[in-house]
Amino acid sequence: MQCLIVFGGPGEIGLRLTLWIAALLVEYGTALAWPASGWTVLSAGHWAERHALIVLVALGETIIALGLAGGFAVGSPLSWPVIGAALLAVAVVAALWWAYFDTMALALEQAMHRTRDRRARAVLARDAYTYLHLLLVAGPVLFALGLKGLIGGRAGPAAPGGELPLFELVVLYGGVAIYLIALAALGWRVLRALRWPTVVAVVVLAGLAPVVARLPELAALGLLTVVVVAATVVQTMVDTPLRRSVRETAWTEQLAAESEQTSWRGRHL
């Protein structure tokens, strides 16, 4: 019994965390140290689509967190502040979704298609997807964790009203900041473009941290929502030429693919 207690205590948790961190360092460090010449990305479209779906799953985790934390799963009564917090969180997730899937996802895939050199494509896939997409997944997961703490246990008469605890502040604002940093890094690495509205949003979130620590929880979440939505709107406006070009290219590619399929079917069916 004593052995089981020792093995199942904090020592085991620390050992597991150490082993997991070591495994991640080996996994991701090897990709940098090992030459990319032996790694081939055959289908740029499939590669980009799989990673985009993982980002979509991470964003969906945030919506699930709202349902589990807000009392929907257990049928607990809901208060208006909790409903308001849920609506604000949905607005944040919608803005994060738009910031990636409206233009960035297509632009990244097209950049992969244009990269014909095998080694250059492998390096681009490693940097843009293996590494930076990890941050796109980690950001929403941290944000979801913060939502569970902010809304969880407050689905009844007690509503969000006190100051935001330090941990929830870090994961809420930090999760969104990590996601935006990844988008800015992707823009620079792949498109060679400085996405200044996104960068400004990260700076603003960092500067607001001392302020929101003294605000009520709902106000802190509302301020986060305003910054994220505003940054997404401004970034979309700045990206208008890129957005038009990317969508036109995607539409032309789709028409070409459908024309080829129609021609093949006419000959064989």
Image (cartoon, rainbow, N blue to C red):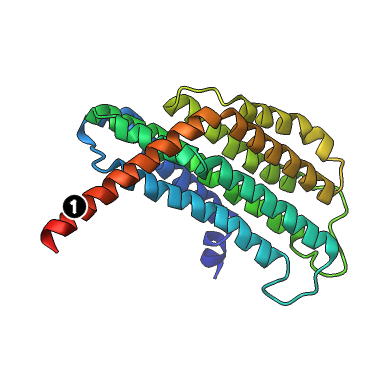
Point 78% across, 33% down: residue:
208
Front in this rendered view, residue 119 or 250: 250
Where does residue 211 sit, x and y in percent of width and height? 83, 35
Position of 167 compared to 261: left or right? right
Q: Residues within 10 Å of mark 1 (few under 14, many from 20)?
A: few
Position of 131 compared to 68: left or right? left
Q: Residue 128, can we see it?
A: yes
The quarter of the picture where residue 83 lies is bottom right
Q: Residue 35, can we see it?
A: no
Front in this rendered view, residue 182 or 12: 182
Where does residue 179 sit, x and y in percent of width and height? 58, 39
Q: Label 1 amino acid?
A: Ser
Is 2 situated above or below 32?
below
Position of 82 compared to 106: left or right? right
Point 75% across, 59% down: residue:
151
Residue found at the very far left of the displayed protein: 268
The quarter of the picture where residue 69 lies is bottom right
Where does residue 232 sit, x and y in percent of width and height? 64, 37
Residue found at the very far bottom of the displayed protein: 75
Where does residue 199 sit, x and y in percent of width and height? 62, 27
Front in this rendered view, residue 11 or 204: 204
